[in-house]
Every structure is written in structure tokens, then in C-alpha cells.
């Protein structure tokens, strides 16, 4: 007989010689083997949902449906996991090639790309600031950034500090963005959005407040009221980056004047006395 509903043959009754055989056990579908990559992916899922304060090995194990002890075959600790997450964030990240004529453009490209990668997951700036990026996987990035500065002929002392300065600026800026996201989420009663919350309304309120201050007491705040707060995070980031780049550029030698790089130190390696003059920016 056939099943009229779908035209498939009906299951026949068991034969006499099979009636006393034990029922065949159902074979469970094969589970995807646990791996370091799966642990890191699960950690990102937990991080985006609960933030860094809610990220734990127990939560990652629950996300994967395994015991906590199973994770330790792939990561040694939570700190190890955070380092792997930070390293994963920059997989495929290609550093710009050094070019002495376009070094500032190269640094802008690097900084903007690094900021976007940190913004791609919640609280990544906090993780970045807590971990020194001198791992085997990230050392080539550090080397390439230093190459940009040294190829531009920045003094060695300035080049050595510039990489840390740029990275600290990126981390700090993204950290502030994350804090505003958290505040916006708390006020709206929802979960933080990966996107920057609408800053325009608050920016307008702050600008109006500064403009309403008495000019005799706050002449500069009032005069700059329309410029003190910008509604665009991208614009704020670029302006801050430009200030840093122009400061670094002030240390470049002037070939026309036959100058050598000024690293702010005397010939004996000690700090040069302050004569009240700023580095030549011409």
C-alpha cells in the first residue's frame, strides 16, 4: 500500500525474525569540532551582546554548548582569549606602504581603518588599551607604521613616540564613542547599537547653551559656541588626527635651509634647554 498523502510507500511491519531485535539507536548529527577559531567567534558574539564586563569563559562555553573545561584545550585563559580577539580584528589588515612625499596621507589611511575595525565590535577599544600590541602577529604592523615615520625623515625619538601617540588617540576616541553608545542605549532602554548614536540633537543643545553664556564671563566659549561641538564623529576624528600630524610635521628638517632633524635633545642625548621657541614649522 502507499500513503495517499504523499505517494510514498508505507513502512512495512517488522518481519518475524526481526521482532525481537533491539530498536536501532538514532544517530545524532555530528557536532562541529571545537576549535580556537570557533571559540574566538563565540567570544565576539558574547562581547557584542553583553559587553566586556559580561564576557566570561562560562558565557563563551554556553554560547558554544560545551563545558568551560573544553575551552582550555584551545585558549589558556580569558586574557589569552582577549588577545586572540584583538589579533583576529586585524587579520587581513594591510598597512600602507611608506612614501616620504605622502606620509601624512598614509597615516590618515591607517588611523581611519584602525578606528573602523575597533568600532566593528563592542568594547574593542577597551580590549585594545589593555593589551600591548607587540605580539608576533601584530609586530609587522608596528614595523610598517614606524617605517612610514622614519621614511618621512622624522627624528628617531619622535618616530618612536609617534606610533604610540597615534594608537592612543585612536583607542581613546573609539572608547569615547563606545561610552556614548552605552549612554544612548541606557536612555532608550535598548541594547547598544554598533553605529554611533545620533549626536546632532545633543550637539545642538550644547551649542545653544554655550552661546547663551554671558560674554563678560565666558567670551571664548560664547565666541566658539558653534564650533565647540561638531555633530559628526568622523569630522571630529579627522580634525584631531590633523592636529597630531601637523605637530609631527613640525619636527621634519627643512632641506632648503640645510636643517637636520630636531628631536628635542642635545647632542649629548640630554634634553636641550628650553629657549622659549617652538620647532620651526615653516
Image (cartoon, grey):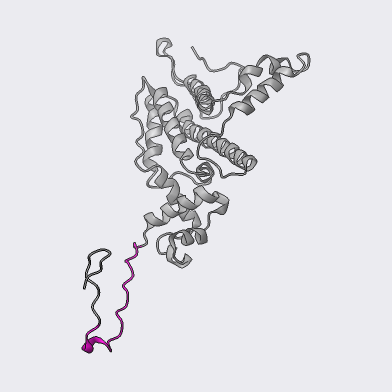
* Residue depicted at x 51% and y 36%: 195
User: Which quarter of the picture shows residue 65?
Assistant: bottom left
* Residue depicted at x 57% and y 17%: 278
Q: Position of residue 170 (x, y in %)?
A: 50, 34
Q: Position of residue 125 (x, y in %)?
A: 52, 41
Image quadrant occupied by the N terminus: bottom left
Where is 64 relative to 111, above or below? below
* Residue depicted at x 62% and y 17%: 276
Indicate left or right for 163 with 93 as reference: right
Where is 4 relative to 221, above or below? below
Which one is nearer the viewer's eye here, 47 or 110? 47
Which range is magenta? 14-33
Indicate left or right for 185 with 151 as reference: right
Where is 157 relative to 18, above or below? above
Can residue 153 be seen by looking at this rendering?
no
Which secondary structure is most common in the magenta stretch?
loop
Q: Position of residue 93 (x, y in %)?
A: 36, 38
Magenta highlight on residue 255: no
Amino acid at each position: 500500500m502507499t500513503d495517499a498523502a504523499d505517494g510514498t510507500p508505507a513502512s512495512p511491519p517488522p518481519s518475524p525474525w526481526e521482532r525481537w531485535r533491539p530498536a536501532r539507536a538514532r544517530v545524532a548529527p555530528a557536532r562541529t569540532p571545537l576549535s580556537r577559531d570557533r571559540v574566538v567567534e563565540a567570544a565576539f558574539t558574547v562581547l557584542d551582546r553583553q559587553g566586556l564586563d559580561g564576557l566570561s569563559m562560562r558565557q563563551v562555553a554556553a554560547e558554544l554548548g560545551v563545558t568551560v573545561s573544553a575551552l582550555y584545550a584551545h585558549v589558556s585563559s580569558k586574557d589569552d582569549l582577549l588577545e586572540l580577539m584583538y589579533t583576529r580584528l586585524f587579520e587581513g589588515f594591510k598597512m600602507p606602504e611608506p612614501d616620504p612625499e605622502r606620509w601624512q596621507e598614509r597615516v590618515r589611511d591607517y588611523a581611519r581603518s584602525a578606528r573602523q575595525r575597533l568600532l566593528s565590535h563592542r568594547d574593542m577599544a577597551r580590549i585594545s588599551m589593555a593589551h600591548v600590541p607587540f605580539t608576533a602577529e601584530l609586530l609587522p604592523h608596528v614595523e610598517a607604521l614606524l617605517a612610514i615615520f622614519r621614511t618621512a625623515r622624522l627624528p628617531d625619538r619622535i618616530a618612536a613616540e609617534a606610533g604610540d601617540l597615534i594608537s592612543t588617540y585612536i583607542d581613546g576616541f573609539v572608547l569615547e564613542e563606545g561610552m556614548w553608545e552605552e549612554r544612548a542605549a541606557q536612555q532608550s532602554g535598548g541594547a547598544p547599537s554598533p553605529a554611533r548614536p545620533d549626536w546632532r540633537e545633543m550637539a545642538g543643545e550644547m551649542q545653544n547653551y554655550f552661546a547663551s553664556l554671558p560674554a563678560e564671563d565666558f567670551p571664548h566659549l560664547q565666541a566658539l559656541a558653534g564650533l565647540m561641538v561638531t555633530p559628526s564623529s568622523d569630522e571630529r576624528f579627522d580634525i584631531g588626527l590633523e592636529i597630531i600630524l601637523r605637530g609631527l610635521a613640525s619636527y621634519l628638517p627643512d632641506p632648503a635651509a640645510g636643517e637636520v632633524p630636531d628631536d628635542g635633545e642635545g647632542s649629548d642625548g640630554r634634553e636641550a634647554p628650553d629657549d622659549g621657541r617652538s620647532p620651526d614649522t615653516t
